[in-house]
Amino acid sequence: MQEDGEEWTNVNAFLAYFTQNNDEAYWINGFYALRDVLEPDDFERPDIWAEGVGLEIYLPSAAVWILIAGDSLWAVVNKTEDGDSCIEQKSSERWDEWKTAFQEIAHGMRGDASERTKKMASDAAIRMEKIESLESVPESVL
């Protein structure tokens, strides 16, 4: 089962790299990866995605999106265009919910995650905080 999780994480890592380097090409895949594991109660599907073995398989895939393409996802979250059919997908409130969920998993407050998965959740939450803090830095400094 761990091999399946690693393969799924590798697919998501590839898409995240592609997104980070190609103008947010597949950002919606990142949102789906994050949504599926961090928002289990909001969608009609079994919670196996966010518990036990499911958590071990799907959380690393969600985390790689933040670790690799978090900057691009943050840009999408903060870019609102008229007529955008995915507008409900993009919000800073949702970003905050994902960060909180990563923190809860990292601290063992949600699900029964392995130490490896908790570490990935912690790394993702820390990365999200760093991305947010860069927003306040003037572009001339970057």
Image (cartoon, rainbow, N blue to C red):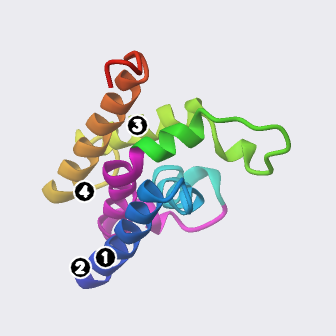
Quadrant showing the C terminus: top left
Q: Please say whether residue 49 is one of the residues in the magenta stretch.
A: yes
Q: Are marks 1 and 2 in contact (CB under 8 Å)?
A: yes
Q: Amino acid at mark 1?
A: Gly
**How far separated are the C-alphas under marks 1 and 4?**
14 Å
The residue wearing badge 3 is 99
Of the two numbered discs 1 and 4 on the same chain, state the one appearing first in sequence: 1
36 vs 82: above or below: below
Residue under numbered circle 1: 5
Point 61% across, 67% down: residue:
45
Distance between the alpha carbons at the discs numbered 1 and 3 = 21 Å
Kind of residue at disc 2: Gln
Identified at 23% across, 44% down, the residue is 123
The residue that disc 4 covers is 113
Of the image marks 1 and 3, the number of the one nearer the N terminus: 1
Distance of label 3 from label 2 (alpha carbons): 24 Å
Q: Residue furthest right?
A: 83
Q: Residue at x 40, y 34 (%)?
A: 100
Please state the horizontal and vertical placement of residue 7, each as a whole percent of the image.
Answer: 31, 80
Give the SS element for disc 2: helix
Question: What residue did someone put label 2 on?
Answer: 2
User: Badge 3: few (under 14), some or many (20 or more) residues near its Cα, within 10 Å?
Assistant: many
> Between disc 3 and disc 2, whose residue precedes?
2
- For the record, the magenta segment spans 44-70
- Type of amino acid at the residue the image marks with label 3: Lys
Q: Looking at the image, do the residues carrying marks 3 and 4 touch, with CB atoms under 8 Å apart?
A: no
**Three-letter amino acid code of the residue under disc 4:** Ala
Residue sitting nearer the eye, 46 or 9: 9
* Mark carried by residue 96: none
